[in-house]
Image (spheres, coloured by chain):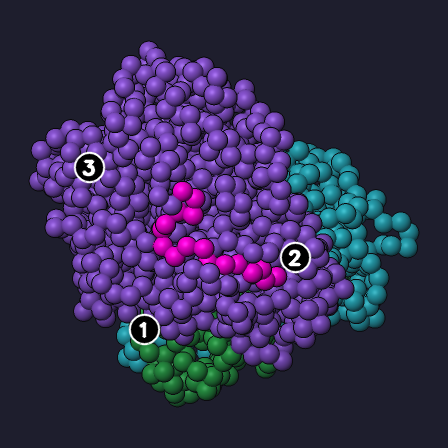
Chain colours: A purple, B cyan, C green
Amino acid sequence: MSDGELPSRAETVIIGAGIVGNSLAYHLAKQGRDDILLTDKGPLPDPGGSTGHASNFLMPVEHSKEMTHLTRRSIEQYDDMDTFTNSGGIEVARTDERMDELERRVQSAKSWGEAGRLLTVEEIEEMVPYVNTDIIKGGFYSEGAGTCDPLRAGEVMRARADDAMDGGLTLSPNTEVLDLHVENGAIQAVETDRGTVEAGEVVIAAGLWSPKIAEMAGVEIPLTPAVHQMVSVGPISFFEDYEGEISFPVVRDMDTQMYERQHGNDLEVGSYQHRPILWDVEDIPSIDEAPLSPTQPPLTDDAFEQSMADALEIVPELLDDPEAGIRHEIDGLLSVTPDGMPLLGPLQDVEGLWSCAAVWIKEAPAIGEAVAQWMTRGWSDIDLHGSDINRFYEYGTSREFVKNRAHEGFQKIYGIVHPAEQWQSSRPLRTSPFYDRQDALDARFFEAAGWERPQWFESNEDLLERYADELEGLKRPNEWDSRWWSPIILAEHLHMRDNVAMVGDMGFGKFDFVGSDVVDYMERMVVGRTDVDVGKTVYTPVLAENGGFVSDLTIARLGDEQYRVITGGAAAGGDRAWFSGHIGADEDVTLIDRSESLCTLGVWGSDARAVVDSVAEEDMSHEAFPPYTAQEVTIGEVDCWAMRLSYVGERGWEIYTSMGQGQRLWDIIAEAGEEHDIRPVGMGVYGTTGRMEKGYRLYGHELELEYTPAEAGLTFHGVKDADFVGKEAYAEALEEDNAATLCTLSVDDHTSSDGERRFMLGNEPVLNKDGDVIVDEEGRESYVTSAGTGPSVGKHLLMAYLPPEYADEGQGLHVEYMGEQYPVTVEVVGSEPLFDPENERIRS
Amino acid sequence: MNVLACIKRVPNTGAKIVLTDDNQRIDTSNLGFTMSPHEECAVEEAIQQVESHGGQTHVLTLGPEEATEQLRTALAMRVDEATLLETDGEEWGPRATASAIATAIRDLPDEDTEFDLLLFGNESADMANYQVGVRVAAELDLPCVTGIKSLEVEDGVATAKREISGGEEVYEIDLPAVVAVKEGINEPRYASMRAKMQARRQEVANLEPDRAVAPGTFEKIRLEAPEADDSDAEVLGEGADAVPEIVELLESEVEVL
Amino acid sequence: MILGLVEHESGVPEETSLEALTMARELAAGEETELGAVVFGEEGGALEGELGPYGVEEIYHVTHDRLDGYAPAAWGESITQLVSELGVSTVAAPGTDRGHEVLAHAGAALDAPMATDCIAVDVVDEGETYELRRHRWGGSLVEHARLEGETKLVTAAEHEYPIEEAASTTEPTVSEFTPSLDDAHLRVRVERVETADEEGIPLGEARVVVGGGRGVGGPEDYDKLEELADLLGGTVGASRAAINEGWRPHDDQIGLTGAQISPDIYIACGISGAVQHMVGCKGADTILAINTDSEAAIVQKADYAVIGDLHEVVPELTEAIRETT
């Protein structure tokens, strides 16, 4: 490990030597990088960022699989470095509502393969004798939880990195980055107050200073520093008999959004209940100016008042120890993002520039590892799609947006957050030309990638009556199950099947590719054969080299040297980065992003042709416009381009036009459809009910890096001759027996022990007859990847990957939901639709 | 025994102090405030003395309304009563400060709560004038000693000790008296959480002091922040070879041998 | 006249007093007046031969039959009377405990302004006004200020004024001065001097602290630090990392959530210098770091450093100190 003079060049420059930068250095070295400069504005081992003031505990069980797996993997790493103490952790409940939430915690623990169980008050008393059990109803015990020493871990990682590279690690503390040099869209060099270093690649791992560094390259990292208040109370005589750092489980007092944990003979008391206190990065003092550290400004007393009262209530004996006082109190600054997830991945507008920001102690080692894998081989063992910084490409990076969402999200950190819960602030932000019409029809808008999309229309309430019989038994009596949901979705679905519906805009990513090399390029990118006739469309997986899913999308050939790629809105930014990142330096391929210029209106249902044909200049007959093809059409006065396909399994088209003509298109279709009682229907139909009946997969749910097309039942392309990314692994997976296969299941009995009918929402564990979570031979738990009602089949449907011994049609299993087990049956193994298995509706 | 501790609100600075653009004061926009370290010990000493001898503790400061925060810190340490001599935030010189404090001390107590011991910090962290305590003592005609790092009271007599090279000077003073203490006399306690919470609701007396005008003036023109010495440590040597240099340091520089 | 307070040890002036005297002489030159010195104590007269090089023309040796040791109010009163009797315009004193204290007493009696810890004083308006610079925040800030008054009191910040001899040596005469003192001036006096008892001192009050961090490697090696601390009359402390390892009891922790120390010297052994730790030892006058890593934060923040393994350095140091004492 060398330090001293800055080198004039380094293959990799990591900006930020907190736990994230150290982990990156180590894992990049392990992945084969051999010339890394690790630099930080502050000194080592504690450069003054969030790493230096965290309370350093890791509670692995979260509702997010990604975060749970990252935390689990981080624990393994801390442990391997001898910097982890397995104290266990308890989340206590003061309310019945929270007890339900803790049931859901158990559910998530099982789904993600983490130990977790409920505790009685007596058990809690036994484990943590200082908790005031009079005010709690029970708890959730996370056996795997514990505490770490991130500063020490950083030292170990630096040493290991240096070993792995035979001295290839250069450390440069006390070095401030002044500028990033970008030329021809690629990173060239890092300019510091100690000199300029040419760099092949640069990672911004500067914690809450990351946005400032990114700005130097003209790109944005949307995070804000936010205060997490923490005090340390000691010396507490009760702890005197216990040696070392921690002998009792960390306690999270969930309903007050606080935690209490032993640290030596202190008790650390932290809070997320106070009003959100957001900082501007410019206001953060320098290391020299800060009395403690830049990220430890003084405690805002008035904001902490209620926290003190709550802490005194839950651990009165310790806090009232006559010898003990508040020895340390801070407004600890940490990074908060618009959706609470980290910001990882390539900053696609500057080649060679990466973000590894908004990472907390609990997930940092694993994220360093995963991002290092991503950088060096294009994919990571743990799927990071929820953390991909490109989810905020083109929207959501303004300071105002970040602050509003961080403000709103702060309350969710320990909150009870419904899986479908919608953000309220900074809306509407992205609206399609249909928005005003939809709003007038009392649409209930949900947001996806910033786009306002109707989930259902209150104006369709009349359909409930019409379909009362069909909906019998599918309505959700439980408040939680029906939160952010409406039975109108089911009625809209049935109306679409029986008549006709219009859906849009979906917020798709729309990328056109042109150039003389575009045919070869496109073949290389995807599993399906794309050198097809002009006018054909191809639905295909996009894979990483491991054969796992990067995306799934539709490609239409527009011309000899022109393709259009249509992909889901949430994945659009990431897909754009993936596709543009794979354009070779000498390849004549240009990506034209049309996401903001085109809108999409789906017209589907039995009467779809009648409606569209009546206003189209062209012949829309089955023969003239066959399924899975695309054509330019003119609808009324509006120039459009349409694809005949459907994610809801219906006859009809996705019709594209310019945003400017979108409203006119809407009006024409609506008017033409009047005699067929055309209804606008929401994304509830498009994204859930319609696709579930059809067995259609959704990226980020069924489709992830951790699963292959073989397992997902998407093998219809076979293995084409052309080479493509992931081909080898893909072909191998086709040869082998699946470790698990994606199945569609239905719920046999919804009745809970108290007689209420309950409806799963997704992410629940799938259990065998013995009540054990099913795990495949690769160690992956079976859990519900998607849940949704299929009104046309009259069942509540679930998708789950099941190992071969359970992947049998008719096989009975159980799903655990809110602490109870419900019988389910495997309906379909693989991708055959439950509704209209021959796809007659699409093909006619 | 009734003990008064006088404190001052000062910014809690880092290694580098940043000034406002007009160089008139410290830029405190990102700083917290605290009481001067010596005064924190004065408060602790007041509490300890009353714990041993009974009586009341009282804390007093002269400063802006915000200085209530520091009074509350003292209350949270379990001082009984607090008084703010509220100013408009201007810096008061030592003479005006001493005069205002002396007046308040004369007026504050009713007959049976005369202060037996008036504790000051040896000097404030920000101004370091070393004279407020002495001037207050003179105005009240009380005996006074400064620079004290050990204090014991018995039978109305305070035994106070001041560190000198190689030992301690011992003073014996009849109470009531003014004593200015130095950091190290005790370890100030940390406020308990409950006390801190209660202190936020405790009453703080608020008086408006008169700003005395004295002959002669001491007037600040501006402040200057000299380049901080952020150089690395002087390396005495490597390994055991450096031992003679360490011995020399301990002998001559630090004088602990 | 400008009067300098000179402290001395058996007739040998203290360095800090000579610093103050240098400042006083500059003031005397600026005001074109003479420089006097005031001395206390039985051996004060012996300074006759010491102060000539510094341009002192008159030494006022204060004696009083009730004044046999240091008594702050009495010293202050003596100076007050000298000021009145001699028409002194300015009294300069060293920025020591006594210098500050005595001048504060004089300032109170004279109702005169006093500027402490000066690092430069310029005479303007023929002595009506001084423009000066003085330390604030322990020297982190410099205040530019104006001092005006019939009588002005100034102290010289310790070790800031280089001691300079006068261009021509004077031959000061010694005048005995007997102030008139009453009981009130003698209420406070040094009763006796004790040697400090340094056994079992709590960390927060220790003059010497030897701290051990993760670099110590285990609980048993703290013996080496104990030995060194004992020898220096000090106390052993530890970093949070070491406490977390269970190597030392919780009470030994130095840092934000442990003891805040303010010793004359802190010897930090095998401690990296995390913020949490440094906050606890910022009150130390001098920090000596013994660390194998020259880039460790503590090496940057310490005053002195030895780059090396504490397991070698500390025992050798202990041995060397044994031999010295």
Crowding near pointer 1: few (<14 within 10 Å), some, many (20+)? many
* Dot 1: element: loop
Give the number of the disc on residue A752. 2
Q: Given contact means CB atoms under 8 Å apart, are the residues at marks 3 and 2 in contact?
A: no
* Dot 3: element: loop
Q: Position of residue A745 (x, y in %)?
A: 47, 55
Q: Tag 1: residue type?
A: Thr
State which mark lies toward you, 1 or 3: 3
Q: Tag 2: residue type?
A: Ser
Magenta-colored span: A820-836
At horizontal 67% and vertical 73% (from top left) the residue drawn is A123
Give the number of the disc on residue A404. none
Q: CA distance from mark 1 to mark 3?
A: 44 Å
Q: What residue is shown with label 1?
A: C292
**Image height of B108 relative to C218, above or below:** above
In the rendered image, residue A530 lying in the magenta stretch gets the answer no
Image quadrant in which the N terminus of chain A is located: bottom left
User: How many numbered badges does the structure rendering display?
Assistant: 3
Q: What residue is shown with label 3?
A: A185
Q: Nearer the viewer, residue A392 or C37?
A: A392
Crowding near pointer 3: few (<14 within 10 Å), some, many (20+)? some
